[in-house]
Every structure is written in structure tokens, then in C-alpha cells.
Image (cartoon, helix red, strand yellow):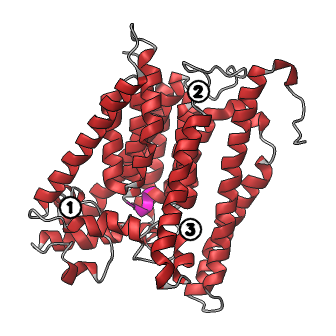
Amino acid sequence: MTIDRRKILLFGSAAALRFSLFSAFPLLPDLLIGRAEISTPVTSFKRLQEGLFLYTHNVSPYDGGVFYQANTSVPAPLFLPLFALIPSQLFSLVTALLYILADLLCAQSIIQIAESGVTRSSRLFTSPRKDIKWDSVAVGAAYLFNPFTIATCLARPTSVFSNCAILYAIASAVNRRPVKSMLALAFAAYLSLYPALLLPPLILLCYDESTVAEHPKTSITASASKLSSFFIGSLSWFMIMSYLLTGQSWEFLQSTYGVHLLLPDLTPNVGLWWYFFIEMFDSFRQFFLGVFWLHLLGYVGGLCIRLRKQPLFVLTTLVGLFAIFQPYPSISDASLYFAFLPLYSHIFPLMRYAFFAVATILYTTLLGPAFYYLWIYAGSGNANFFYAITLVWSLGLSIVVGECLFAVLRDEWELERPEMKGKDVRRI
């Protein structure tokens, strides 16, 4: 087996950078844990520690009278016995190494996706710009040295494991391992709920990649039924294990998935939901919860139909939309979306407003913490300060998602009409 020295150097330098930050700045992780941009009520490492403390003292973290009233969400039950195995004296060191390892696994999955070449040439579509590409190691480096990724690793939210499972599911799909892909996606959905919406495009990706080598080809209906059944079975197994670990109780459902669906915790974050529902009358709350979730769900079918030839790009776009429109987003979700963008370097020349999008994201990255400080600590601002900058952040991400969609559609159109290559498109 050949050893890629560049990959070893990449992983070693990324791990050394993270470990040196943990060691040289011991107060930095604690500072980042409390940042609203990184930690949310459903992913906070601090809430994981609180739930772990109750679990190790034989108190149910999901007991409504003990924990639920103080904190509206607790991480998935499978985390508790796993983290309980870590000795208290080594807890900080072991968790730091665990999160560094998770980042490296994410990078390895990204590299495998890049090496497959599916983003440029798949069963149903081959880009006319397929020769434009980034090296797979460069794609992994873009993820590992992204400041958002590094800050997320230091803050240690549980979203890191969801991202890792999503990337592993996609990497398994492009490498023609559909069973592993469904198992990984089920684990991601078990942790965060919203990855379940990635099931339709992931099934399409598994089908496209597996049928390339199959003779005769199975029907898409049979393949979808089989993969959906395995996904549901895997998710059910995780639920049953959680039921047994919590003393044969279903209390954890309200404190995990109920928080996503019903939004009881309105802690400020970089999303769009919290301020809207603070201002919402209770009589309209259930209606708009349904509207917001249907809005998020509506993208899945439309993108799968319009971009049927490129299911991996559908997954990429949905990840970007989740970073904007899910109930409790953070920069961890944005870093996952940014990890996919270098895979589509062949469409970069087709983007029109890339500078404006990048400038907007940099603007909000610098001013977001300042506005939050003015509101919470200095007392010289109000909630509108922070919400305004989160709106601009969402605008920047929306521009990136929209630009990528335009570029991919333009790429498909030029393949169908080569004579229009390089010409401006105008709406009449």
C-alpha cells in the first residue's frame, strides 16, 4: 500500500495546530464554548457536561423536574455512556483528542469524495469543464485550515459528530458502499434530526454509483425501498438503544428531537428562527413552526427533481440551506457547506457575485462578535443589533448558495447548447 506523504503532512500539521491551541491557550476553548455563533442549545459542549454529571450521579438527565426546566435540551443518550468512560482527570485532554480525530475523519471523507471525481463526471452528467479541479489534498486542507472548522473543534459542540457522519455517508455512497452510507446517515439523523432530509438525494447518489458496476441494473424503486428500509431500521436501532440506556423511558425524545421541532429554547444564535419566535404571539406559534419546517422540507423535492443528474450537488445545496434555515444553526454548519465548495472548483469561473458574497461573510464574521458584545455585555445595544448582523450573515450564505446553483445550471445548459458558451444570459 502506497503512503501519501502529503496527506500525512496535512493531517499531522492540522492535528498539531489544534493540539497546540488547546495546550497553549487553555482558556480559549472555554471562551468559545460560550459563543452563540458556535454553540447552540442542542449542540453545546457545556450542556453535554451537565447531562454527563447527572448521568454519572444516577440522575436521569431527561427528568423534567431535574434537568429539563433548567436546560431545554440534552445531547443524544448514546453520548452519555461513551463520555462517562473518560476519567475525570483526563477529560479535557481526551475530548480534545477525540474532536481532533473527528476533524481528521471529516477531512479523509472529503478527500475520498474529491478523488472519486463524482462532482465533475457522474453516471448521468459530465461537465464540459471537468478538467478544472483542485487536488484532493488541497480540498482536505481547505477544510482542515478553515478558521470556522478550527474554532468549532476548539469549542467542541456535538455538531462535529453530525458533520462527520454526513461526510462519511456521502464518501461511502461515492465509493459504492450504500449500506455504510445509510448507517452513517441514520446516525447523523439520530444526533441532529435534520440530516434525515438528506435521505432522498443520498439514495439517488447511491443508486447512480452502484448501478455503474451492476449488470443487469436494479430498478430505482427497488433500490430506494431497500435503502430506505435499512435507514429506518438503523435509526430505530439507535432509538431502542437510547430507550434502554435511559432506563426504558422515552423522555429523551422531548429533550432532543422535540427541541428541534418545537423550538422551546430561544437562545440567540446565527439563525433566523429565535428572534422571529420571540416576537411571535403564542396563538400563531404552532402555525409558523409548521410553515418554517415546510419551507425547509420544500427544497428537498424540488432540488432532487431539477438536479436529478447531479445528486451530490443536491446534497451540497441542502447542507448550505440547512446552515441558513434550520432552527439552531452555527458556524459548524457553515463550515460543512464550505467544505464541499472546493469540490466544485470547475464552476467558480461561472459565478457572478463571488466577491460580494465573500466580502459579506467576512464582514459578518468580524462584526458579529462585536454586535453581540454590545448587546449582552456593554448594554449599549439591544437584540436588534445581533439579529441584524445574523440577517446579513444569512444573506451572505444565501448568495453563495444561489451563485453555486446558477453556476451549475449554467454548466448544464452549456453542455446542452455549446454554441452559447461564454455568452451572457439575459431574462426577456
Q: Image check: 361 left or right of 154?
A: right
Q: Which residue is mark 3?
A: 270
Q: Name the residue located 65 percent from the left edge and 64 percent from the top edge.
A: 393
Q: In the rendered structure, which disc, 1 or 3, sits on the residue that comes first in sequence?
A: 1
Per the model, the C-alpha gap separating discs 1 and 3 is 27 Å
Badge 1 is on which residue? Answer: 80
Q: Main secondary structure of the magenta part?
A: helix
Mark nearest the camera among 1 and 3 is 3
Amino acid beneath label 3: Val
Instruction: Name the element at disc 2.
Output: loop
Front-most of 316 and 235? Answer: 235
Q: Is label 2 in contact with label 3 (beta carbons under 8 Å)? A: no
Q: Secondary structure at mark 1?
A: helix
Residue 226 shown left or right of residue 392 in the figure: left
Give 113 or 370, whichever is nearer the viewer.
Answer: 113
Amino acid type of the residue that numbered disc 2 sits on in the rendered structure: Lys
The span shown in magenta is 153-157
Spot occupied by residue 262 in the image (x, y as percentages of width and height):
40, 70
- The location of residue 63, given as percent across then percent down, is 18, 76
Between residue 346 and residue 238, name the one nearer to us. 238
Q: Earlier in the sequence, mark 1 or mark 2?
A: 1
Q: How far is the residue under mark 1 from the one under mark 2? A: 41 Å
Q: Is residue 258 above or below residue 242?
A: below
